[in-house]
Image (tube, grey):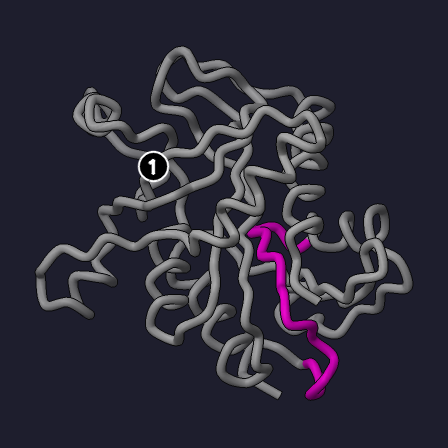
Amino acid sequence: MAFHIGAKKGEIANTVLLPGDPLRARFVSENLMQDSFCYNEVRGMYGYTGFYNGKRVSIQGAGMGIPSNTIYAHELINTYGVRTLIRVGTCGAVLPELKLGQVILAITASSDSGINNQIFKGLNYAPAADFALLSAANDVAKKLGIDAMIGNVFSTDVFYSNEEDRWGVWAQHGILAAEMETSGLYTIAARFNVKALSILTVSDNIITGEVSSAKDREQRVSDMMKIALEIADE
């Protein structure tokens, strides 16, 4: 057992999906997986292992923000031998033309987080997705008829900000959306030589103020989850 995950050895699959919301992990377990069981309830951060189209896969709630996400990623990798981590979460678009429900495959993640500054002593590091996972996700999206955009995202530590025109310079340099975990996930995956990818769904547009309805979020999140489950390694 790890500090934050109560699973026994062998209960977690080689591929783990990482939603921030533990209730989303439970929803996927109950609606998209077969023969699933709950291996973790520590701190209410549910984790499940089951099967999807015959493939064994796990899904583990990981909380909000880089510190929480990387705690779970670290324990999954180093205690349970997980080799593939797929973040499945929502994001806010920083381009006005991006529609609600747009699926984004994050190729890189810029960030304002101080964690990588500590690791790299103030130098810049460019965290990136695993190319094989990225390519597979793009192929699956096309096969399923899901519109998936490949691009760069921004991982922030600050959800509520008073900064005016915060996203202008980032949008100008190709950032599609803001979220709170990808930069940390890609960095820890690189450190331990495992595969990682963030698959995101636009739940709101920060620039236009549009916000998805609960029904729209449910449908689009299902699209994102299907892509992740399809590319899971056995």
- As for residue 17 lying within the magenta part, the answer is yes
Which residue lies at the image location 70% right of the left edge and 54% below the top edge? 25
Q: Is residue 226 left or right of residue 29?
A: left
Q: Amino acid at mark 1?
A: Asn
| Nearest the eye: 122 or 133 | 133
The residue sitting at the left extreme is 122
Percent position of residue 144, x then y: 71, 31
Which residue lies at the image location 46% right of the left edge and 70% below the top edge? 194
In magenta, the rendered stretch is 7-22
Which residue lies at the image location 49% right of the left edge and 69% below the top edge? 73
Q: Is residue 27 left or right of residue 104?
A: right
Residue 189's image quarter? bottom left
Percent position of residue 165, x then y: 20, 20
Question: Could you tell me how many numbered marks the image carries?
Answer: 1
Q: Quadrant of the N terminus?
A: bottom right
Helix, strand or loop at label 1? It is strand
| Nearest the eye: 129 or 211 | 129
Position above or below: 67 against 79: above
Position above or below: 214 against 20: above
Percent position of residue 109, x then y: 32, 46
Query: Which residue is the site of mark 1?
Result: 152
Mark 1 nearby-residue class (10 Å; few <14, some 14–19, many ≥20): many
Percent position of residue 8, x then y: 71, 86
Q: Is residue 96 left or right of residue 234?
A: left
Q: Quadrant of the C terminus?
A: bottom right
Q: Is residue 40 left or right of residue 121?
A: right
- As for residue 113 lying within the magenta part, the answer is no
Which residue lies at the image location 44% right of the left edge and 20% below the top edge? 205
Position above or below: 82 against 145: below
Q: Main secondary structure of the magenta part?
A: loop
Residue 6's image quarter? bottom right
